[in-house]
Amino acid sequence: MRPLLSLLLAGSLCLPVVSHAAEPQGAELEYRVYVGGIAAARYFIRYTATDLRSEIALTAQSEGFVDWLIGWRSSQHAEAEVDPLSPTLVQRVSFRSTGVFRGQTRTAEVTAYPNRPAEWRIDPPEDPEPRTPIILEQTAGTLDPLTGTFLSLRQVADAATCPGKIPVFDGRRRFDAVFEPPQAQVLPVSTYTIFSGPTLVCRFTMKRLGGYIIRENDWNKPEDRDRPITLHLGTVLPGLPRLPVRVESELTVGSVVAHLVAARPASGATRMAALPPK
């Protein structure tokens, strides 16, 4: 469940902002994730950016029965130096993540570059589960999930369009997020979310390239691997372009849906947060 939920929210991080001020501007967002209609996790996201730099922090934790079952916690942070002549290109990206799953801690650090392979370190270095190999050359020009979606979807801004493809590497998995043409949909009023109204719909699938568990399980079924993830973008905060308001996918275990439950403006630096408490 960890990679899937992280991907759903990573796919939702189209947090576009254009700030010419010295003080970074952005937003703080909170999501609640349901699996098969049962509350399963909470995500907290803070991002701030200027024309030259972006910083994004994400913390997440399982809740309810799912928390009793897996006890999952995660904290991620990404910062990118943006090309001043092209806001969707980066000169360097640094990404860190730490997480706990059933009492076991895992960390990853990645530095990515536009024209050469990424450098990364993971702990523990050996995974007990056999995985598909990661080809070093395929990490060149990649972005971490947070920065990749932020910068690639930043170009969406107020235009009714979706990106074509986002090359992603988080230190363990390498995939391309491949998008379909945009659509439009109106979300009704719901007690699950603070948002209702018109949305831009961006739907994408993951093209797996390396680092994935080979063994089949409930969260790694062949029939689920090509199922699309649907992202709804809506206008939530004054002065900011569309933000993710709903992210969803249908799997054999049931529907996975992330709802926006809180949003507020943010400014200043964004730092990596401590792991959420149990």
Image (cartoon, grey):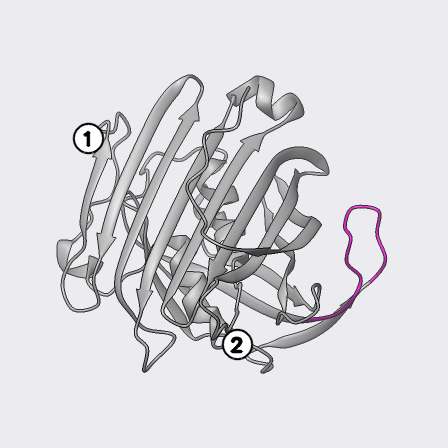
Which residue is pictured at 69% across the width and 64% down the height? 237
Quarter of image, res 241: bottom right
CB of mark 2 within 8 Å of CB of mark 1?
no
Q: Is 229 part of what is drawn in magenta? A: no
Q: Disc 2 designates what residue?
A: 156
Which residue is pictured at 22% across the width and 52% down the height? 111
Tell me the element at label 1: loop
Circle number at residue 210: none
The amino acid at mark 2 is Val
Query: Whole-Å distance between the Cαs marked 2 and 1?
Result: 37 Å
Query: Which tag, 2 or 1, sits closer to the chain's start?
Result: 1
Is 96 positioned to the left or the right of 125 in the image? right
Q: Position of residue 196 (x, y in %)?
A: 80, 62
Q: Where does the magenta region start and end?
A: 188-199
Label 2 or label 1, whichever lies nearer to me, is: 2
Circle number at residue 125: 1
Q: Position of residue 218 (x, y in %)?
A: 50, 34
Which residue is pictured at 42% across the width and 17% down the height? 103
Residue 228 in view here? no
Instruction: From the viewer's side, name the closer residue of 90 and 115.
Output: 90
Q: Chief secondary structure of the magenta span?
A: loop
The amino acid at mark 1 is Pro
Which residue is pictured at 52% across the width and 75% down the height? 162
Tell me the element at label 2: loop
Residue 19 in view here? yes
Instruction: From the viewer's side, name the closer residue of 226 and 137.
Output: 137
